[in-house]
Amino acid sequence: MAAVRLALPARRCSRLAAQAMAAVDLEALSDVKKQTGYRAVDDFVKSGMIVGLGTGSTAKYAVDRVAEKLKSGELKDVVGIPTSERTKQQAEELGVPLTTLNDITSQVDVAIDGADAVDPGFNLVKG
């Protein structure tokens, strides 16, 4: 079979290469966010805790992981407090028990949420 060669202008090739690299980078970034969300749950959430469930692409994976561990029985008696309607809906769909800040009589044990930025002093910025 003869090789087929596409003749594209250099500018078009560069744009296609950049788009391909961006797609790869987004896929890698998504994988890192998933690993981060899972690890936050694995390292910090224990049975019996009240857990703040954040909002965003990384926190979504943490909610997934809490649900997975509750379903498997690895975690028991975990109650979540969602920070948004979107997180509330996700948690409800996955069967994660929820409450509100107004309904708890103790402190939130841990909250999992991503940072929108990190300043030069390594302070996390949200919103």
Image (cartoon, rainbow, N blue to C red):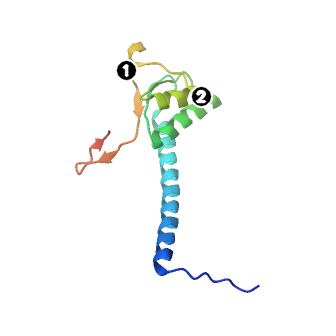
Q: Is residue 83 left or right of residue 23?
A: left
Whether 108 is drawn above or below 11: the answer is above
Residue sticking out furthest to the right: 1
Q: Position of residue 1 (x, y in %)?
A: 77, 85
Q: Which residue is mark 2?
A: 93
In depth, the one of 96 and 107 nearer the eye is 96
Q: Residue at x 61, y 81 (%)?
A: 6
Q: Residue at x 30, y 43 (%)?
A: 124
Pointer 1: residues within 10 angstroms few (<14), some, or many (20+)? few
For mark 1, give the secondary structure. loop
Q: Which residue is mark 1?
A: 107
In depth, the one of 27 and 50 nearer the eye is 27
Residue sticking out furthest to the bottom: 2
Mark found first going from the N terminus, 1 or 2: 2
For badge 2, the amino acid type reads Glu
**Gap in Å between the C-alphas at discs 1 and 2?**
25 Å
Q: Residue at x 25, y 48 (%)?
A: 119
Q: Position of residue 34 (x, y in %)?
A: 52, 46
